[in-house]
Image: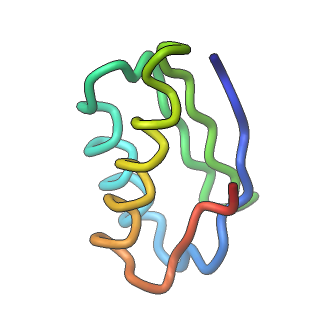
Amino acid sequence: MKKVFKMEDLDCANCAAKMEDAIGRLNGVKSVRINFISQKFTLDASDDLFEGVLTEAKKIVKKIEPDCAILA
């Protein structure tokens, strides 16, 4: 399943790259792309694991940039 979400308060392109790397290592992730300019988060993950992956991705985003959020 592939879905695109809006991000809020993503202030750093370097942080976006760190988030991509960490989220990409989660079990079930096929691909992840964070566009710093458009503030878009694209996640492609296994259908049966998607919600769990999204929950973990949100935690990773908060850990790297506490003011940032994935709007889902």
The residue at the point 29 percent across, 42 percent down is 21
The image quadrant of residue 53 is top left
Please provide percent x and percent y for residue 28. 35, 19
Residue at 70% in and 31% down: 3
Q: Position of residue 16 (x, y in %)?
A: 44, 58
Name the foreground residue: 23 vs 17: 23
Rendering coords of residue 40 (x, y %): 69, 52
**How is the rendered protein coloured?**
rainbow
Quadrant position of the N terminus in the picture:
top right
Reply above or below: 55 against 4.
below
* Side of 36 relative to 62 (left or right): right
Give the number of marks: 0
Judged left or right of residue 6, residue 52 is left
Query: Residue 22, located in which quarter of the rendered image?
Result: top left
Is 5 above or below relative to 64?
above
Q: Residue at x 38, y 72 (%)?
A: 62
Residue occupying the point 39% across, 23% down: 29
- For the C terminus, the image quarter is bottom right
Which x, y percent locates residue 52? 41, 37
Closer to the camera, 30 or 48?
48
Residue 31 lies left or right of residue 19; in this view the side is: right
